[in-house]
Image: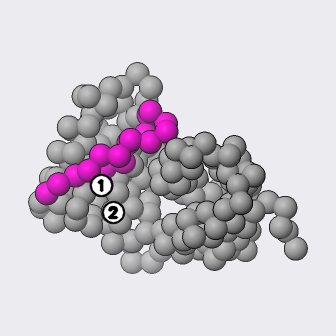
């Protein structure tokens, strides 16, 4: 199986994209020992050492390393762990029978992780960035900054890019709006 590695604007984050789907739900982030119990794959990646957090989505494993760790050492080991899970058919994330309601803080952390892994790198390539303001009643309020702030295509980027990606991975998001458009 082929695994594509994507670099991001943050040199401590790499996205590992296997050609086979490894997680059937939307997205799950693991950054502490309690959450690691829910993901054998994230636990295996953490056990390698030098890892700060792991975000697993349907088509990607995004790993944030500690600054002193080396991608040269970590990347082959992370790929081996992903390949092991894909080869055995083991679940990357254990699913509970009932999905507990997420706290607003946990949901915002999940949104932030997804933005850092999937959206921010694309905006950074064009000289822009995104700031998360608040999440309320299904609406995520954001602010596009840098070159994106004054761009005539900012609303299109927000709706066709940011909103589409976030709604795909996090079903609790019903809409993404720019700060300043509060009703």
Q: Taking 150 as reference, is 67 left or right?
A: left
- Badge 1 marks a residue whose secondary structure is strand
Q: Taking 174 as reference, is 74 left or right?
A: left
Is the residue 17 above or below the residue 66 in the image?
below
- Rendered residue at 68%/46% (across/down): 147
Query: Is residue 2 among what the camera can see?
Result: yes
- Rendered residue at 27%/67% (across/down): 21
- Disc 2: which residue: 59
What's drawn in magenta, residue-wise?
1-17
Is the residue 85 above or below the residue 47 in the image?
below
- Disc 1: which residue: 17
- Badge 2 marks a residue whose secondary structure is loop
Q: Where is residue 69 drawn, in percent x and y?
A: 36, 25
Compare residues 50 and 128 and report the one nearer the observer.
128
Is 7 covered by the magenta stretch? yes
Asked whether disc 2 touches disc 1, contact meaning CB atoms under 8 Å apart, the reply is: yes
**Residue farthest to the front?**
152
- Rendered residue at 38%/41% (across/down): 7
**Residue farthest to the right?**
183
Q: Where is residue 107 drawn, in percent x and y?
A: 59, 61
**Closer to the N terminus: mark 2 or mark 1?**
1
């Amino acid at each position: 199986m082929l695994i594509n590695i994507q670099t991001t604007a943050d040199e401590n984050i790499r996205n590992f994209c296997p050609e086979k789907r490894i997680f059937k739900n939307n997205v799950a982030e693991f950054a502490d020992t309690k959450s690691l119990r829910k993901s054998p794959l994230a636990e295996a990646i953490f056990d390698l050492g030098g890892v700060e957090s792991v975000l697993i989505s349907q088509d990607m494993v995004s790993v944030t390393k500690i600054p002193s760790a080396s991608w040269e050492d970590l990347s082959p080991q992370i790929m081996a762990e992903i390949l092991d899970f894909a080869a055995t058919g083991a679940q990357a994330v254990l699913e509970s029978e009932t999905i507990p309601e997420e706290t607003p803080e946990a949901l915002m952390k999940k949104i932030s992780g997804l933005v850092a892994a999937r959206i921010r790198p694309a905006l950074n390539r064009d000289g822009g960035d995104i700031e998360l303001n608040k999440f309320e009643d299904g609406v995520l309020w954001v602010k596009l900054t840098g070159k994106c702030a004054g761009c005539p295509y900012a609303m299109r980027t927000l709706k066709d890019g940011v909103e589409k990606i976030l709604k795909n991975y996090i079903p609790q998001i019903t809409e993404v709006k720019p700060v300043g458009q509060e009703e």
